[in-house]
Image (cartoon, rainbow, N blue to C red):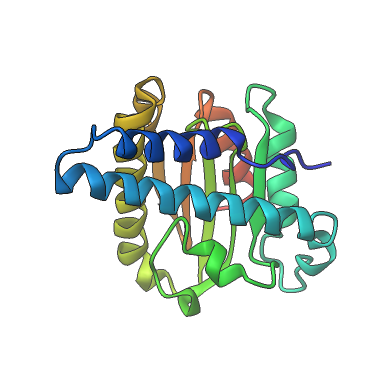
Amino acid sequence: MIKGKKILVTCLMLGLGVSSLAGCGKKNNTADAKEDTQATQTQTMELEMDETADKNDGQSGADEQKNDGSVSMYDLTKAILESEDSLPDMTTVNSSASDADRLFAYVSDVDYSKIDSFLLAYSTEGKADEIAVIKLKDAGDMDEMMTSLKAHLKDRKGIYETYDADQLGRVDEASLYSKGDYAVLIICDKKKNIKAVIDEAIGE
């Protein structure tokens, strides 16, 4: 059973913290206000993703069975989570969701029409842990994808710089790479183990 059915209470608390600080007059410039808006938008997206994951849990397996020999993102998600006990509870979504294009926008701004399939797992507890595997329809779009994922990492760093410096170093040590038409992002303490599972699955 895939872990990750809890709503991000931590993120809600962070959102409340932003409102409280604003009310107390501690945000005195446009840059700080922009950071608050960005963080709140990210937290809202994560909450919506959690709700969608709850609705889709238990349904994705059948949807993600591939007949062309490509990777089942449902099966790969399961293999990743079962392979590493050090991961926190993770919320998971993949390209079988009815609103997959909206969910994908959390991690990348690349046009979803260029995506063959994807999986995303991130910490339900508001920690930095995050794993994404994205298969492109055309490997020629990989440079655009990698640029987009680097921007995503920069956004995450900006949030943790403001609200949870303890997690910042973990984002700095993220593993970001491509193999063939797959892009992979891993933020966790035992990246080597997760990478081995992913690389075996994609067979590149």
Residue in the picture at 64% in, 28% down: 88
Is 72 or 27 nearer to us in this picture?
Answer: 27
Q: Residue furthest front?
A: 24
Residue shown at the point (68%, 32%) measured from the top left: 89
Displayed quadrant of residue 39: top left
Q: x, y percentage for residue 23?
A: 33, 38
Query: Taking 191 as reference, is 72 left or right?
Result: right
From where the camera sits, is residue 128 visible?
A: yes
Q: Position of residue 14 (x, y in %)?
A: 46, 35
Residue at 61% x, 39% y: name it: 8
What percent of the width, then of the height, locates residue 93? 65, 55
- Vertical side of 18 occupied by 99: above or below: below
Q: Where 68 sits versus 48, above or below?
A: below
Q: Is residue 119 above or below residue 7?
A: below
Furthest toward the bottom, the residue is 113
**Residue 202 can be seen, yes or no:** no
Residue visible at 69% across and 23% down in the picture:
85
Task: Tell me: 9 left or right of 57.
Answer: left
Q: How many marks?
A: 0
Image location of residue 186, percent across then percent down: 48, 39
| Along the viewing direction, whichever of 115 and 199 lies nearer the viewer | 115
Is 84 in front, or is 153? 153
The quadrant of the picture occupied by the N terminus is top right
Q: Is residue 98 above or below residue 167?
A: below
